[in-house]
Amino acid sequence: MSQLQNDLFLRACKKEYVERTPIWMMRQAGRYLPEYRAVRAKSDFLTMCKTPELAAEVTIQPIDLIGVDAAIIFSDILVIPEAMGMHLEMNEGVGPVFPNPIRNENDAKQLKAIDPSVDLKYVLDAVSLTKKELNGRVPLIGFSGAPWTLLTYMVEGRGSKSFSQVKKLIYNNPQLAHFLLDKIATVVADYLSAKIEAGANAVQIFDTWGGILPPDDFQKFSLNYIEQVISRIKRKDEPVIVFAKGVHYKLKRLAKCGADVIGLDWTMDIGRVRKRIGKKVALQGNLDPTVLYGTQKKIEKEASKILESYGEGSGHIFNLGHGILPDVDPQNAKYLVDFVKHESAKYHKKN
Amino acid sequence: MSQLQNDLFLRACKKEYVERTPIWMMRQAGRYLPEYRAVRAKSDFLTMCKTPELAAEVTIQPIDLIGVDAAIIFSDILVIPEAMGMHLEMNEGVGPVFPNPIRNENDAKQLKAIDPSVDLKYVLDAVSLTKKELNGRVPLIGFSGAPWTLLTYMVEGRGSKSFSQVKKLIYNNPQLAHFLLDKIATVVADYLSAKIEAGANAVQIFDTWGGILPPDDFQKFSLNYIEQVISRIKRKDEPVIVFAKGVHYKLKRLAKCGADVIGLDWTMDIGRVRKRIGKKVALQGNLDPTVLYGTQKKIEKEASKILESYGEGSGHIFNLGHGILPDVDPQNAKYLVDFVKHESAKYHKKN
């Protein structure tokens, strides 16, 4: 494995000294880049995920074009349920759809036990290839959905406002919910372990739908399984990041889940969160993604506010508070990255 | 005006002694009731809003059928932009749509200045008629969207995931945003004043989209205008409730906005919030609406948890953390109401 030329991201995850705050952006390999759209125009989304050459190409684009300090493998959290046997449709405009969602014991029986190192080999191949092509320029992040978020998609079958189906499941058939979550958690842990083995330098667990649960149910149906996953991941010193969108409660509990880094959405004050849990974990975030619609002055102002709020010292990975939006001007994304690289140095003076 | 036979809700809003915790449910006059659907089958949504007899009929249904302690006038927050000249379409399944949203100065010029006591007279007539038909059984609540939430709908034109358009507006043309918010705030204040004059015993301001803003922007673009509205409402002792969904930050600031009651969504621990702001305001909430999909045992457990978390003494109005969902079994809603009425008495023992 080649030595990393830029390991700021990894050092910040471990709260080691950095000369400046590292930055990357969720969904940075995505539709806002014309270069991404050019690849996407020739190939559907799932084919891109399943073709290591294409996945590697779009994964590396933001490193070259935007200058971020970490790459995140191009993929989708729903490849796990798909590998478990669920038919997945990616409908432009509608988003991903499982036409046959899991609602009862019979549906659940249809789910296959899988070995991610076999059944999701295409992701691992993409990781290895990307790693080789990155040639040590920046670290590579692997990721997975959290068990709860995966279950939500598997039960709802599509995006939802009220999440009625998955709530009905956990409130009326908690046993089945726990059975499924346990099954998914095992797959997620194996999957992330395999990604690390294939070369990922860090992994991120996305709990996009953690925040729809009341605090106690979040603990029971989501956080417990995140902990289970983290404790089972085979890793040396590869950091684990947990991003639980909307989870403003249970932060202290979240900080003890075994993750090295907690990702924050844009509704949190990163300085206040640091005071509460910053001794325990590093923090990642948390610019409102829509700020990239703003002027350069607005971008500077909001980015400065976050850097200042976090304050001096390591343990901050700059990121958006959610994925970059498809209609953002790439120049604004680049402006943000350049600004953070330059502006953050003053918070990292060596004593 | 007839004396109220049940004024528990009003007393709890003012934190006066109550024998038990009052309860009502957001969207209680709604699709989960077969009796509502029967009215709706004969008339479209906007016609129902605009026909005082129909609005009164469905407003009173949950008083008779479910036994809630307050009525809330059947209407929609979007009647204000409609009265200001925006064409509103209510599309079954899609939700409300403004085909010609407000995006720039030219669009903004199309908005008419209105006098709610004239241009929204049908709502006031519905309030008067409902009041008469309620005959003092329970208090009647009037409501409005918060200026920010109304602006969001007016600019987006429809539901949104990323709220790109309204964010672009506030970040790139804050002057126009403030101009519009100021204009809307005046209308909202006049509208709520007129509702009180027509007989509403309390008013609720819904800031459904407050939580999509980072904390500072929430203050600037939403809370300031909520304060403006509240300070302008002409009222005697009618309480004002503010429900800002997803606003877990700025709670102390929110408690100082002039509202008597703060509504909480289901992600907050009502007991912890009481400790922070409960001296200043009463609290309303906050059962996850999807708990009503659960068994009676689950409903009891979660309702008990909230009652216990709030603890002894007045100042709690039991409610859901968001509107009741259309596919809830009315028997479960009734079960919750009966349970809260019975179970809450022990938290209100007179010394």
Image: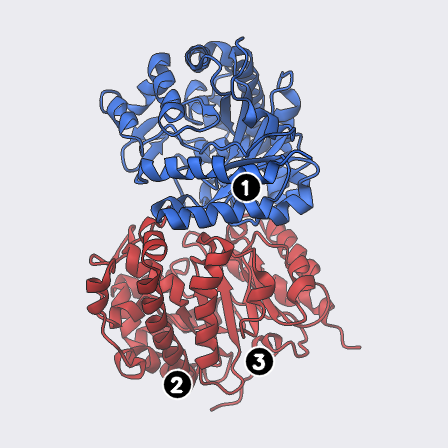
Chain colours: A red, B blue
Image quadrant in which you'd find residue A338: bottom right
Q: Which label number is shown at residue A198? A: 2
Location of the C terminus of chain A (image quadrant) = bottom right
Which chain does the residue under circle 1 lie in?
B
Q: Residues within 10 Å of mark 2 (few under 14, many from 20)?
A: many
Mark 1 belongs to which amino acid?
Leu
Q: Residue at x 75, y 73 (%)?
A: A349
Q: Which label number is shown at residue B208? A: none
Would you place residue A326 above or below residue A76 in this image?
A: above
Front residue of B349 and A186: B349
Q: Residue at x 25, y 77 (%)?
A: A113
Q: Which residue is mark 1?
A: B264
Query: Does label 3 lie on the same chain as label 1?
Result: no
Would you place residue B103 above or below residue A222 in this image?
A: above
Tag 1 secondary structure: loop
Mark 2 belongs to which amino acid?
Ala
Is residue A87 visible from the viewing direction of this image? Answer: no
Tag 3 secondary structure: loop
Image quadrant in which you'd find residue B121: top left
Q: Tell me: B51 left or right of A336.
A: left
Query: Does label 2 lie on the same chain as label 1?
Result: no
Please provide percent x and percent y for residue A269.
64, 55
How far is mark 1 from mark 2, CA to CA? 46 Å
Would you place residue A285 above or below residue B222 in this image?
A: below
Mark 3 belongs to which amino acid?
Asp
Q: Which residue is mark 3?
A: A7
